Amino acid sequence: MTPRSGSGALWHRSTAVWEQQLCTAETGFELRRRFCRRVDALPARTEVAADRLPDSSDSPVRWASPTLRDETAVFTVRGSAQIAEQLWPEPGRFWTDRTGVEAFTELGRALRQLHTEPPDFRLPTSTPHLERLAAYLDDRCDTSGAATAVLTDLGADVVAVLRIWLRELPPADALGHGGLSLGSTFVDADPTVHIDVVVGPELVRTTPAVDLGWIVGELMEFSYLRAIRGIPGDPYRRLATAFTTGYRGSMEGPMDDEIVHRVALLRIVLHLCDYAETVRLNGDAGAHAHLAIYTPFVRGLVAHPDHREEGE
């Protein structure tokens, strides 16, 4: 990925999942993202993103759909800061007060609106991320072996449970983002004014719990890492509660918290596998020891789901 003439690269990142580059553009910023593995129905997903995403003119949250350049999805966003980077390793000043709560509440509301759209049958029923997780769990990925080591540490009993959870996800009955993460969410100086969520290459017919659990799992991971570092307070739990509260809004019927919890753990395990593969590719021999700190966390939450974070 090479910046186009007249636009400067702010950063370029390569992982086991994708290559990404953020550049300045004539209006705002341009994110270029290419998956390392083939994504099924990528043109159809991009077409649906352009046609079917809900109007967000009355919300600070905007769904930013891409154009395709070969296999690279190109998004225009108004802010250059990913929420993930603003929250870790220590939340910035906005995220520990009412502003952060408002931003996550609005994100939950916008996601609820997306899920009220009828599913589009041009879309697959599985996300690239869940497909990658299934391949890791079944040892079908062409990898360096680092992900296999992570799963071995977690134990065959945990891997068996994760396989069952993946198979038992509810039927696909909604239009879903398919990869809603804090790394796909961009803000500017005030996160309650502009929140751009890049969407398209992962768009899917899915159960709403997949998108909910993806964000909740990311915040659970931040919360755990903060706790083992001995830092008092837990702003991440507060943000998770704001997100799910915004999502519930005036929805009819209960939200299936148990399925959201399962997806959150699936997302955490996938992140561990992806991270292990990424750092192995980059030659970090000490990564396995770092990832071992997650073993009691994941095993505990699989065995005792009642210990899950408040707000799921």
Image (tube, grey):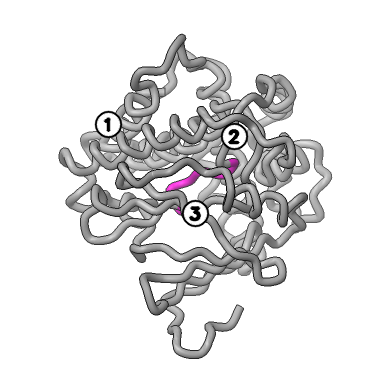
Q: Which residue is mark 1?
A: 238
Q: Nearer the viewer, residue 42 or 296?
A: 42
User: What amino acid is labelled 3 in the image?
Assistant: Val
Residue 295 location in percent, x, y? 55, 35
- Asked whether the beta carbons under mark 1 and mark 2 sit within 8 Å of each other, the answer is no
Choose the circle earlier in sequence order: 1 or 2: 2
Q: Is residue 180 magenta?
A: yes
Q: Secondary structure at mark 3?
A: strand
Whether residue 189 is visible, yes or no, is: yes
- Residue 198 badge: 3
Q: Secondary structure at mark 1?
A: helix
Say whether residue 130 is magenta: no
Describe residue 195's horizontal placement relative to residue 208 as left or right. left
Q: Which residues are magenta?
A: 178-184
Q: Which residue is mark 2?
A: 175
Query: How far apart, in angstroms, are the residues tagged by discs 1 and 3?
Result: 24 Å
